[in-house]
Image (cartoon, helix red, strand yellow):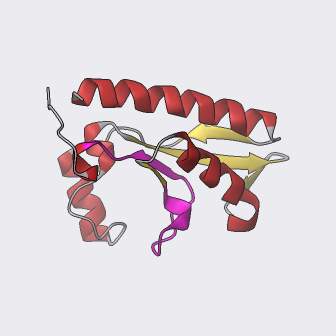
Amino acid sequence: MKLQDEQWAFVNDVASLILYIHTHGFTASFGEVYRTPEQHAIYQLAGKTKSYFSQHQKRLAVDLNFFVNGLPETDIKILGPIGRYWESLYIGNKAGMFWKFYDPAHFERRTNKEHGEEDTVV
């Protein structure tokens, strides 16, 4: 699958996630979507990431800030169903709230190639 096709599938999954969030009593705002390599390097130096690459750089990640009754929410006990829903949409969808480096705002899509299948980059 071409990167552009992966990005479009990702956008569609994000739309489904937003509807799920809305119907379950949450509100959200967008955080980071696209990240330049320069910005990623700044995050590395600041200790905000240990990774050498981010799906944000391929436009396959989004950060969502969650709110309940107008207040910010980051508790895994409350947000867990949102992460499970995201991961149920596609085998390559991963929610940062389930990672050792807890990132409850992060939702990403890993490409077919990252699952061992062929991938055509545009």
State which quadrant residue 52 falls in.
bottom left
Query: Residue 18, percent across and down?
Result: 64, 33
Q: Is residue 24 left or right of residue 76?
A: right
Q: Identify the residue at image location x=33%, y=44%.
A: 56
Q: Position of residue 102 (x, y in %)?
A: 52, 69
Please state, as top left, top right, bottom left or bottom right, where the N terminus lies in the image: top left
Work out which quarter of the rendered image holds the C terminus and state it: top left
**Residue sitting at x 53%, y 33%:** 14
Q: Is residue 112 at least partly visible in the picture?
A: yes
For residue 120, above or below residue 31: above
Residue 117 lies in the magenta-colored region: no
Q: Is residue 51 left or right of residue 101?
A: left
Magenta part of the protein: which range?
Answer: 95-112
**Residue 2 percent across, percent down from the top left:** 22, 27
Q: Nearer the viewer, residue 96 or 117?
A: 117
| Residue at figure coordinates x 71%, y 39% from the top left | 21
Asked if one can make out residue 73 in the rendered structure from this viewpoint, the answer is no
Q: Position of residue 110 (x, y in %)?
A: 34, 47
Left or right, 71 with reference to 12: right
Q: Residue furthest bottom?
A: 100
- Can you say whether 43 is above or below 21 in the image? below
